[in-house]
Image (cartoon, rainbow, N blue to C red):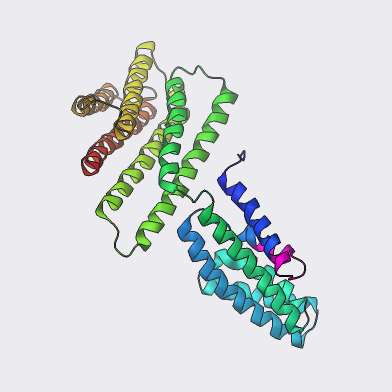
């Protein structure tokens, strides 16, 4: 998996810089803890930043108190540090704040190093707070996360990769090593889109009075994700079953042509969502009829259970389901456009 430079990386660096400067300006001593806290606290959305801030304040406060008490009784005893860490982990899990464990443990170890020196322990605790607040401020002010914009852009780029792989899957034109690399990248992209959808869904659920248009838009986004996943399932079905069955050149052409229709349909729906197509440019009913005919034709063709019939039937069914999900996405994007108008 390759990493690319993005806004979150830049913001993490800025948060660390801000935490270091703030620590030096407040003369808090070694600012390393503040820098570490800033790294742990950077989140992919505004809501998660706020939620993480509140949760982290609770857990590091609890962790610091336990660490100071333990430091009074067992000054600098390694086994005591381990026991307190285990206790803090258990408490974080019980409170369903597992995401805060890392920074809380850093705070515990730093505070216990003070060995009961309250002034020094409070200093370490404040340094952790400076790091958390620095990450929160930077996340809001610098390139604030826009998961909806990023989601749509990533859907488009992921579809381009899916389209390339589907168009060369039946003909088997692409080098196997290149195809494998592209397929892995496609899977990673779809998983990343799934993560962004979870962020949007999470924010939508936390709104006290979410707008109907926002809820409707989320339904469209979910279906966009579903269609990409179905397209990926077609690739997997072709790889697992299609080439293991006996096929004629005529059959290859039928599969290839139908898959091309589905890909174009998918592309037209995306263009329709982006409001780049003329009204009526997508003939959904005709495509739906052709998709139905394709599956019926394949099932009728292999009702006598020819060699490889079951494998080809599986591929046909997955392709049909891809078209079915596209049809649903087309209807949803139509409703979404009406709401936008």
Q: Point out residue 153 in the picture as x, y percentages from the top left corner.
A: 43, 37
Residue farthest along the top direction in this orientation: 249
Quadrant of the image for the N terminus?
Answer: top right
Would residue 46 be found to the left or right of residue 117 on screen?
A: left
Q: Point out residue 225 in the picture as x, y percentages from the top left corner.
A: 39, 42
Q: Quadrant of residue 314?
A: top left
Point 29% across, 52% down: residue: 215
Magenta stretch: includes residue 57: no
Would residue 253 be found to the left or right of residue 15 on screen?
A: left
Q: Quadrant of residue 269?
A: top left
Q: Is residue 103 above or below residue 311?
A: below
Q: Point out residue 11 in the picture as x, y percentages from the top left corner.
A: 59, 51
Q: Is residue 156 above or below residue 96?
A: above
Quadrant of the image for the C terminus?
Answer: top left
Q: Point out residue 83 in the picture as x, y percentages from the top left corner.
A: 70, 77
Residue farthest along the front direction in this orientation: 25
Boundaries of the magenta span: 23-37
Inspect this view and state whether residue 58 appears.
Answer: yes
Point 25% across, 54% down: residue: 212
Q: State whether the magenta stretch is mostly helix, strand or loop.
A: helix
Would residue 23 be found to the left or right of residue 266 on screen?
A: right
Decide which of 184, 293 is in the foreground and name it: 184
């Amino acid at each position: 998996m390759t990493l690319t430079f993005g806004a979150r990386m830049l913001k993490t660096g800025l948060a660390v810089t801000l935490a270091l400067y703030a620590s030096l300006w407040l003369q808090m001593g070694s600012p390393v803890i503040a820098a570490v806290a800033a790294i742990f606290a950077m989140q992919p959305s505004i809501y998660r930043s706020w939620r993480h801030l509140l949760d982290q304040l609770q857990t590091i406060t609890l962790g610091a108190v336990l660490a100071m008490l333990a430091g009074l009784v067992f000054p600098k005893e390694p086994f005591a540090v381990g026991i307190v860490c285990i206790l803090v982990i258990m408490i974080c899990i019980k409170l369903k704040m597992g995401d805060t464990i890392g920074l809380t443990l850093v705070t515990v170890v730093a505070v216990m190093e003070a060995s009961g020196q309250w002034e020094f322990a409070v200093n370490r605790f404040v340094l952790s707070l400076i790091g958390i607040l620095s990450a929160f401020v930077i996340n809001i002010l610098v390139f604030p996360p826009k998961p909806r914009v990023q989601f749509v852009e990533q859907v488009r780029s992921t579809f381009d990769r899916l389209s390339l792989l589907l168009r060369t899957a039946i003909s088997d034109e692409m080098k196997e090593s290149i195809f494998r690399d592209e397929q892995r990248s496609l899977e990673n992209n779809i998983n990343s889109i799934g993560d962004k959808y979870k962020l949007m869904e999470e924010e939508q659920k936390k709104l006290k009075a979410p707008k109907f248009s926002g809820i409707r838009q989320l339904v469209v986004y979910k279906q966009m994700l579903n269609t990409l996943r179905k397209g990926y399932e077609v690739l997997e079905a072709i790889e697992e079953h299609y080439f293991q069955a006996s096929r004629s050149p005529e059959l290859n052409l039928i599969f290839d042509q139908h898959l091309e229709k589905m890909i174009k349909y998918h592309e037209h729906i995306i263009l329709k969502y982006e409001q780049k197509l003329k009204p009526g440019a997508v003939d959904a009913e005709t495509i739906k009829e052709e998709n139905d005919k394709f599956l019926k034709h394949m099932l009728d063709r292999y009702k006598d259970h020819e060699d490889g019939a079951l494998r080809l039937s599986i591929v046909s069914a997955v392709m049909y389901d891809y078209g079915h999900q596209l049809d649903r996405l087309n209807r949803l994007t139509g409703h979404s456009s009406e709401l936008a108008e």
